[in-house]
Each structure stands twice: as structure tokens, then as C-alpha cells.
């Protein structure tokens, strides 16, 4: 029976349409990739032409990438600095969110206290607050009340962690509350305390959910621009690569030919994470309450 | 490359402080007297997340709501910011654009995603075909902006075109077009970028839902003489209704908050601004935090009914299953 349904649904026209969509969706990224390897004169100026001509004139260079990455004066893109910033921002934030969210999710799933369900619904509801609503007061709080220095990662770490927690708690709660109660009960009978149960039983059993959340958090922070613009101060000391990319692509000029290479440097990491861990990413999407 | 060492040190220090705090909490939980042990655990495990969310989300949301009724100097000015928003031509354009975005992006992304999911269902190479359309989900809005600036690239009429679309326009005998400059259709060309990103999301969710529709139902419809379209219309679509609602609402919310695409591609110029972008411009560039807060509040009010509806659909589904 499977066989017949299969032949019925995959007609030639459907396959053709699917391939057209797939090509249309891939061409923009592919174009950027090819352009990023073309010499400056081919990209801007009188001798420039479309990237598709690269396959006939066959001129490629790594110079754009070298120019974009190495620091050379204040005019240079200097992306390697910002690349390191992105890593220095995203790794602590991901760890903070994973640990804090799983601790809270554990208590929401297995702790016993008054108002637990009400509080959990409240945390869930926090997801509806748009980031935009939090920015102005939070910036005032950081700079005026806490006196956090502007040129440090601290503001970005804390802000991203704050914004990541509601979804993190919700996703992990869904998973942790499904862990069989007998497992936890058995450990308790053996004399294990809450912290032992949490680190030795809950976390190891939650690895699939933690992986999904880690990927979400990683992609979200790596790709963010808004939080960075508000809290980083924009210097090479702390600003992430997205912010630098927005800057250099926003100013038109003689160095326009560097934009494709710069863009590709910034998207290569999320693409690798995505293709390497696509399975966990999809699983996370489907478990975010979306499956119903 | 000495900067790497310095930056790494900051990261290591932060992680060490974090580990110390967590370690301290675990120690307190373990050493607490038996009578209050459960209470200390709940408090210790919940406190860090609770404090961060209170300071980072609850308090700012309340503050912003109040700020929306003040002027640039911080003095109360009643509904002036909202009057500005609904009377000034530029502000009205921003609102109009936001409405166009929130109508078109969910509709187009979901339609393309659904069509693609159906076309590739059980096809050969399904996984690869899925990855290709899903891939833009991993790319930042800034990156996507640069990718599409290249697609929309414009050169004068008599020289070689560098953008794909203008290349085809010229090949077909048309004049090249400045896609990002000509209002009002430039908003549509920005919207296409968001559709390009969100279609993959719709496709993945809907594809999983389609696989959940019982094969027997489709087979029964086929035996009753239904053609492919009727099978799709009368069996598949009702079977994935819940997923369709979730996809539509999720994309709508993401679209309302979209900021980076407009910021990177036009910076909100040429009549392309949307509420989320205007909010940033007013609050952090124009020195009008009151107006920015008012725009943020409007954004919140637009998101609210969608989320409530979404939550109700989800709950209903849970009850059925």
C-alpha cells in the first residue's frame, strides 16, 4: 500500500516544482559564495560583471578573505577580532542559559511548592514580551544602577542570558517532566540529595533536549544584531561579527568588494553548526510545544 | 593575535565566577537542615533564573509601559507619543509597512513551505532538498540582508548588471530596476528576504505534520476517486490544521519583531521602516525614548492576541490527544 501512495503523490510535476523552488532558494547564498572569491575589479568598477561570469573567465582569489580578516588600520574590516568576540559572547551565554534553565525546569517539574503551576505559566508568558520592550530600561539599569563598564562583555552576557531563559525553561521543562518518577524516587531512596539527582540523573538523561536548546541559543546569539547594537558599545573590544558586518555593509565605498567575503565569514559558523546538528535542531523545533 | 588571550581570559573568569555561584548554591542545598531542605532547594534552584527574568524582562516591561507616556525630557506627556504615531506621515508609513509585513510574510512563507513539503514528501533525495530550503534559517538577518543586496544589485542601463534579477530583466529587454529605492514596492522586496528565511521553518514543521496524517485516510480518499488535489484539500489540510495555525502565528510574531533586515538593507530609508526598526531609531538614535517606548508598547499589543490565540489552540490540541 505504501508503494501505491508513494507513486501517487510524487508526480513528475511536483518533483519539477520542488527542484525549481530548491534552486531559487539556493542561488542567493551560492551567488554570495562565488562573489566572495572574485577579484575586486570584477566586483566593483568599470570591469565588473555578475558572479555567474566567474565560470567562464575563471578568476578566483583568496585576497578578499585575507583583507577582511587581518587588521590593517582603522579602515579595515578587522573581522578576526569581531569573530573572536562573537565566540567569547556566545559560549558563556549558552552555558549560563543551559545550566540556569535546567535548574529552574527541574524545580518546576519535580519540586513541590505552592503556586508552582501558576508561576510556570507566568514564565511561559514572559516569552511574549518583545525584546524591544526590555532594551531602554535594561540599558539604564546596567549603566546607571550597576555601573557596568561599557567596553566589556558583561552587559551582553547578562542581557542574552535574561532573554534566553523563558524559552529555555519551557523547552527543558517539557522534557524533564517526562523523565519517569521511579528513576528519581530510586535515587532518593539510595540517599541522593537534590543536587546529586540534578547533576547525576536529570542532566545526563536530558542530553537530547539540552543539545536542541544549545543549538537554538547558539544560533540566536551568534546571529543577533539588536542586543549587540544596544549593549556592546560598538568597539572592536566587544562587538560581535554581525554588528561589524552591518557597519561595513552600511557604508558604500571603495571597499564594497569585501562585503561578500565578510558576510561569508560570519555565516560559516552557524551553517556548520546547522548542517552538523540539523537533527537536534529539527527535534527542538518540533518539541517547542509545536507538535501539539 | 595577543587580543585572543586577553579575551579568552575574560571568558574564563566569567565562567569561573558562574561555576563558583552554582557550586555555592549546590553546597547550600546539600548542607541545609532536613526540615527546610526542600524549601532551600526550590529557592536555590529557582532564584538565579527568577532574579534574571525579573530584572531583565518584568521590570523593563513595566518601565517601558510607563516611559511610553513621557517626552524626550522624561516628563509625562499623556498620549502625545501615540498621537504622533497615528498622525505623522512617516510614523503612519511605518505602521502601514508593518501591517503589510505581517500579512504577507506568514501567508507566503506558509504557502511555499506547505507546497514544498507536499512536493518533496517521500521523494528521492528528500533530506537534501529539505536542507537546501531550510538552510536560510541558520543565516543571520544581517547576512541575509547582504546576500539579497547582491541579488537586487543595480547598475545603470547600459553596463553589465551584477545582480541576478536585473540581469534577467535586461535579458528580457526591460530596464534595470532599483529594487530597494523605489517606494512603495521596495517593501515587498524586503519582505521577500523574510519569506526566504521563514519558508524553511514552515516546511519543516508542516512536513512532520504531513507524515503524521494516517496513510489509510489518503488511500481511502484515493479509492473513492479523489484526485491528488482533492486528497490534499480534503484529507491532508484538515489533518495538519493545528500545525498550520502554529506555523502561521509563530511566523507572524517573528515578523512583527523583524528589525535587522530593514536595518541592513535600507536602514529604514525610502519609506521602508517598520515598527521594530523605528523603535530602535527613535529610542537610541533620535533621543526620543518616549516615542521608542510607545512603539515597543504597540508591538507588544500587536503580539499579545496572537500569542493568546496560539496558547488556546495548543491547549485544545492537548485535550484532544
Image (cartoon, coloured by chain):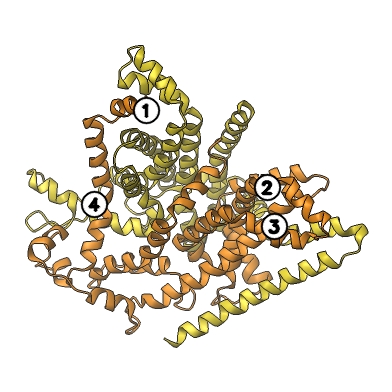
Chain colours: A orange, B yellow
Dot 2 lies on which element?
A: loop
- In whole angstroms, how far apart are the C-alphas of marks 3 and 4? 46 Å
Residue at horizontal 53 percent and vertical 37 percent from the top: A291
- The part of the image, by quadrant, that contains residue B74 is bottom right
Image position of B214 (left or right of A68): right
Mark sitting earlier along the chain (3/4): 4
Quick check: B61 above or below A287?
Answer: below
Q: Residues within 10 Å of mark 4 (few under 14, many from 20)?
A: some
Of all chains, the one bearing label 1 is A
Mark sitting earlier along the chain (1/3): 1
Mark sitting earlier along the chain (4/1): 1
Dot 1 lies on which element?
A: helix
Of all chains, the one bearing label 4 is A
Q: Which residue is mark 1?
A: A2
Q: Which residue is mark 4?
A: A27
Q: Which residue is mark 2?
A: A179
Amino acid at each position: 500500500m505504501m508503494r501505491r501512495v508513494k507513486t501517487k503523490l510524487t508526480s513528475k510535476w511536483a518533483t519539477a516544482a520542488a527542484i525549481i523552488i530548491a534552486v531559487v532558494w539556493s542561488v542567493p547564498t551560492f551567488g554570495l559564495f562565488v562573489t566572495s572569491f572574485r577579484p575586486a575589479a570584477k566586483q566593483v568598477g568599470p570591469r565588473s560583471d555578475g558572479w555567474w561570469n566567474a565560470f567562464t573567465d575563471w578568476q578566483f582569489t583568496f585576497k578578499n578573505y585575507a583583507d577582511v580578516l587581518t587588521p590593517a588600520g582603522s579602515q579595515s574590516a578587522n573581522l578576526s577580532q569581531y569573530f573572536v568576540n562573537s565566540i567569547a559572547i556566545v559560549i558563556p551565554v549558552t552555558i549560563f542559559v543551559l545550566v540556569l534553565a535546567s535548574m529552574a525546569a527541574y524545580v518546576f517539574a519535580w519540586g513541590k511548592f505552592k503556586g508552582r503551576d501558576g508561576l510556570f505559566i507566568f514564565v511561559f508568558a514572559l516569552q511574549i514580551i518583545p525584546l524591544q520592550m526590555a532594551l531602554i530600561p535594561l540599558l539604564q539599569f546596567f549603566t546607571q544602577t550597576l555601573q557596568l563598564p561599557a567596553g566589556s562583555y558583561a552587559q551582553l552576557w547578562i542581557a542574552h542570558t535574561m532573554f534566553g531563559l523563558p524559552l529555555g525553561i519551557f523547552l527543558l521543562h517539557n522534557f524533564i517532566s517526562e523523565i519517569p518518577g521511579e528513576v528519581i524516587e530510586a535515587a532518593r531512596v539510595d540517599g541522593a540529595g537534590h543536587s546529586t539527582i540534578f547533576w547525576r540523573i536529570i542532566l545526563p538523561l536530558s542530553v537530547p533536549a539540552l543539545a536542541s536548546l544549545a543549538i537554538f541559543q547558539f544560533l540566536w546569539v551568534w546571529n543577533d544584531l539588536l542586543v549587540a547594537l544596544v549593549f556592546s558599545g560598538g568597539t572592536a573590544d566587544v562587538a560581535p561579527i554581525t554588528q561589524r558586518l552591518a557597519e561595513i555593509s552600511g557604508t558604500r565605498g571603495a571597499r564594497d568588494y569585501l562585503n561578500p567575503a565578510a558576510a561569508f565569514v560570519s555565516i560559516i559558523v552557524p551553517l556548520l553548526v546547522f548542517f552538523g546538528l540539523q537533527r537536534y535542531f529539527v527535534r527542538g523545533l518540533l518539541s517547542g510545544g509545536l507538535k501539539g | 593575535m595577543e587580543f585572543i588571550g586577553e579575551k579568552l581570559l575574560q571568558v574564563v573568569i566569567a565562567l569561573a565566577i558562574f561555576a563558583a555561584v552554582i557550586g555555592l548554591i549546590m553546597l547550600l542545598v546539600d548542607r541545609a537542615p532536613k526540615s527546610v531542605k526542600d524549601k532551600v532547594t526550590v529557592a536555590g534552584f529557582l532564584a538565579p533564573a527568577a532574579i534574571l527574568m525579573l530584572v531583565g524582562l518584568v521590570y523593563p516591561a513595566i518601565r517601558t509601559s510607563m516611559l511610553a507616556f513621557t517626552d524626550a525630557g522624561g516628563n509625562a506627556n499623556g498620549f502625545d507619543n501615540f498621537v504622533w504615531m497615528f498622525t505623522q506621515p512617516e510614523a503612519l508609513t511605518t505602521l502601514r509597512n508593518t501591517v503589510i509585513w505581517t500579512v504577507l510574510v506568514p501567508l507566503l512563507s506558509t504557502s511555499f513551505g506547505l507546497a514544498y513539503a507536499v512536493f518533496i514528501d517521500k521523494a528521492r533525495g528528500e533530506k537534501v532538498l529539505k536542507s537546501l530550503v531550510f538552510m536560510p534559517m541558520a543565516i543571520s538577518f544581517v547576512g541575509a540582508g547582504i546576500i539579497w543586496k547582491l541579488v537586487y544589485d543595480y547598475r545603470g542601463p547600459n553596463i553589465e548588471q551584477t545582480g541576478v534579477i536585473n540581469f534577467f530583466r535586461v535579458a528580457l529587454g526591460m530596464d534595470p530596476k532599483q529594487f530597494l529605492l523605489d517606494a512603495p514596492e521596495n517593501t515587498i522586496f524586503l519582505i521577500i528576504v523574510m519569506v526566504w528565511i521563514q519558508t524553511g521553518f514552515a516546511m519543516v514543521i508542516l512536513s512532520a505534520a504531513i507524515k503524521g496524517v494516517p496513510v489509510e485516510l489518503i488511500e481511502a480518499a484515493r479509492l473513492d476517486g479523489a484526485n491528488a488535489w482533492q486528497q490534499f484539500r480534503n484529507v491532508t489540510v484538515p489533518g495538519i490544521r493545528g500545525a498550520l495555525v502554529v506555523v502561521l502565528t509563530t511566523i507572524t510574531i517573528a515578523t512583527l519583531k523583524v528589525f535587522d533586515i530593514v536595518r541592513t538593507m535600507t536602514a529604514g530609508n525610502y519609506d521602508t521602516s517598520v515598527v521594530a526598526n523605528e523603535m530602535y531609531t527613535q529610542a537610541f538614535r533620535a533621543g526620543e525614548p518616549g516615542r521608542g517606548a510607545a512603539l515597543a508598547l504597540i508591538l507588544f499589543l500587536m503580539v499579545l492576541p496572537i500569542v493568546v490565540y496560539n496558547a488556546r489552540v495548543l491547549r485544545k490540541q492537548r485535550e484532544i490527544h
